[in-house]
Amino acid sequence: MNTREITIAGGSKNPLKIKRFGYGTMRLTGEGIWGEPANRPEALQILKQCMKSGVNFVDTADYYGQDVTNRLIKEALYPYPDDLVICTKVGGARKPDKSWIPFNRPENLRSSIDNNLSTLKLDQIALVHFRVIHGSDVPFKESMQAMFEMQKEGKVLHVGVSNVSPDELQTAIAMGTIATVENMYGHGQRRSVKLAHGGETRGGEEVLAICEKNKIPLVPYFSLFLSMPKKDDRISTMAKKYNTTDVQMNLAWLLHRSPWILPIPGTSSLKHFKENLKATEIKLSEEDMKFLD
């Protein structure tokens, strides 16, 4: 895979150089991001294909399918390649009714980190995002302080944040080194979007500007949802020009939008995984980018 590298925590003592195209595991779970995958052998095959294809950044969380993706990662990839960066998230949990709830008190974050370490069979997690979930009465600073404490203890190498507002990101940067930001971002969704259950998923333009200024990679999630908030026909027009799919064009746009963007498209299909990788081969011109913007 011929994709440029990106450096995580470049100003720290332990920078991580990875390929600028990762994989998000959320879709490997069952329906509703719950339970085991419909096709377990294919899920394991996708993870193994990541390594064969040069993808060395894998995003997960212990609340994906109730620890399903972590167990799949361990089964498929352990013992891990030296250059593999496993990024997980804490700050959320699932109730038996499958609803999403904040799990962000210091003791909650610590138990989540310990759970990730145990399931993934790691002594230290290379990168952990603190995920902001609405409805919490825990101050953002309190949660972030707990994250930095666990970093000092050696449980976490690098700390990142997820689903943050520009103000929250600035607050986090003032508290310590923020390695990465995982926010919703894609051609079709560059602003905050109200969700059906009443929450909000934060957009990325303002956050991207802060990331670029501070040389912090932005890891976009939901980047393949071309219809949020509405589909933009310009992506389809450009996809026809290059004889690609809309999804591939959206990924190509992300790679060209900023050198600080690290896409992590997720899928449960090995065929789609391979198709997504081909987006790295698309070369958009300045005129193409002006048209898409």
Image (tube, rainbow, N blue to C red):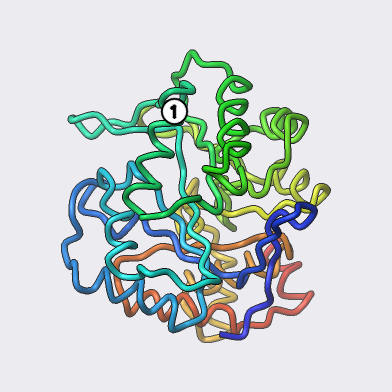
Which residue matches tag 1? Answer: 199
Q: Position of residue 194 (x, y in %)?
A: 48, 32
Q: Position of residue 23 (x, y in %)?
A: 46, 65
Q: In the picture provided, is 132 more to the left or to the right than 175?
A: left
Is residue 104 or residue 267 the one in the foreground?
104
Query: At x 68% / y 77%, what residue is drawn?
Result: 4
Split into 4 quadrants, where in the image is the N terminus? bottom right
Query: At x 43% / y 59%, what residue is drawn?
Result: 24
Q: Is residue 70 above or below residue 164?
A: below
Is residue 43 or residue 270 the one in the foreground?
43
User: What is the secondary structure assignment of the residue under circle 1?
Assistant: loop
> In the picture, residue 5 is in which quadrant?
bottom right
Query: At x 59% / y 54%, what residue is drawn?
Result: 219
Name the residue furthest right.
Answer: 213
Split into 4 quadrants, where in the image is the C terminus? bottom right
Q: Position of residue 95 (x, y in %)?
A: 24, 29
Q: In the picture provided, is 97 more to the left or to the right than 207?
A: left
Q: In this view, does 63 lie above or below 271?
A: above
Q: In this view, does 190 lie above or below 23?
A: above
Q: In the picture provided, is 281 more to the left or to the right than 258?
A: left
For label 1, the crowd category at 10 Å Cα-Cα, with few meaning under 14, some 14 to 19 and many 20 or more, is: few
Q: Where is residue 158 in the image (x, y as percent from the top left)?
A: 62, 47
Q: What residue type is labelled 1?
A: Gly
Q: In the picture provided, is 75 more to the left or to the right than 148?
A: left
Is residue 47 or residue 205 the one in the foreground?
47
Q: Is residue 274 above or below residue 163?
A: below
> In the picture, residue 280 is in which quadrant?
bottom right
